[in-house]
């Protein structure tokens, strides 16, 4: 009987402590919970600017490889903040091309990287047009 009481006490304490834990959804760093259309528009413009800056850096070849890779990473992080179901497929397509461009650049295939990054800029501009039309 004493063992049963101890077991019930342990279970009830565990249940109380679990229910006391705050249940809040995890939000990725930098994400805007339920971003407004205006915030998404600003994020899209910033992402276009970063992708154009990255493309220009690859073409010019004046920055170090690490600096260009950092720009590519910043562009990708910025694109992740575009939270709109309307343009999600296009955004994913651009992110895919950005990843392929980054890989090509790392392998020293500058022409392929330029071609892919040019497509990335074009796709992000499509994202902007599609989002504005909605």
Image: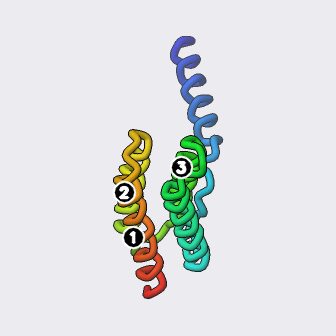
In the rendered image, which quarter contains the C terminus?
bottom left
Which residue is labeled 2 in the image? 97
| Distance between mark 3 and mark 1 Cα atoms | 17 Å
Upstream in sequence: badge 3 or badge 1: 3
Structural crowding at the residue carrying mark 1, measured as other residues with C-alpha within 10 Å and reported as few (<14), some (14–19) or many (≥20)? many
| In the image, residue 18 above or below residue 8 | below
Q: Residue at x 53, y 52 (%)?
A: 61
**Which of the 4 image quadrants contains residue 116?**
bottom left
Q: Position of residue 9 (x, y in %)?
A: 60, 24
SS at mark 1? Answer: helix
**Number of numbered discs:** 3
| Distance between mark 1 and mark 2 Cα atoms | 9 Å
Q: Residue at x 41, y 58 (%)?
A: 114
Type of colouring? rainbow
| In the image, residue 3 above or below residue 132 | above
Which residue is labeled 1 in the image? 123
Q: Residue at x 53, y 62 (%)?
A: 56
Circle on res. 73: 3
For the residues labelled 1 and 2, say whether their Cβ atoms are less than 8 Å apart: yes
| In the image, residue 13 above or below residue 94 | above
SS at mark 2? Answer: helix
Upstream in sequence: badge 1 or badge 2: 2
| Distance between mark 2 and mark 3 Cα atoms | 13 Å
Q: Position of residue 47 (x, y in %)?
A: 54, 65
Q: Would you say residue 24 is visible in this rendering?
A: no
């Amino acid at each position: 009987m004493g063992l049963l009481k101890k077991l019930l006490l342990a279970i009830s304490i565990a249940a109380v402590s679990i229910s006391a834990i705050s249940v809040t959804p995890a939000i990725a760093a930098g994400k805007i919970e339920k971003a407004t259309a205006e915030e998404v528009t600003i994020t899209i413009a910033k992402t276009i600017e970063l992708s154009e800056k990255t493309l220009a850096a690859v073409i010019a070849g004046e920055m170090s490889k690490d600096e260009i890779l950092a720009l590519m990473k910043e562009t990708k992080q910025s694109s992740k903040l575009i939270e709109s179901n309307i343009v999600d497929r296009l955004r994913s397509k651009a992110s895919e091309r950005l990843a392929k461009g980054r890989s090509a650049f790392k392998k020293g295939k500058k022409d392929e990287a330029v071609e892919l990054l040019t497509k990335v800029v074009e796709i992000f501009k499509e994202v902007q047009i599609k989002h504005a039309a909605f």
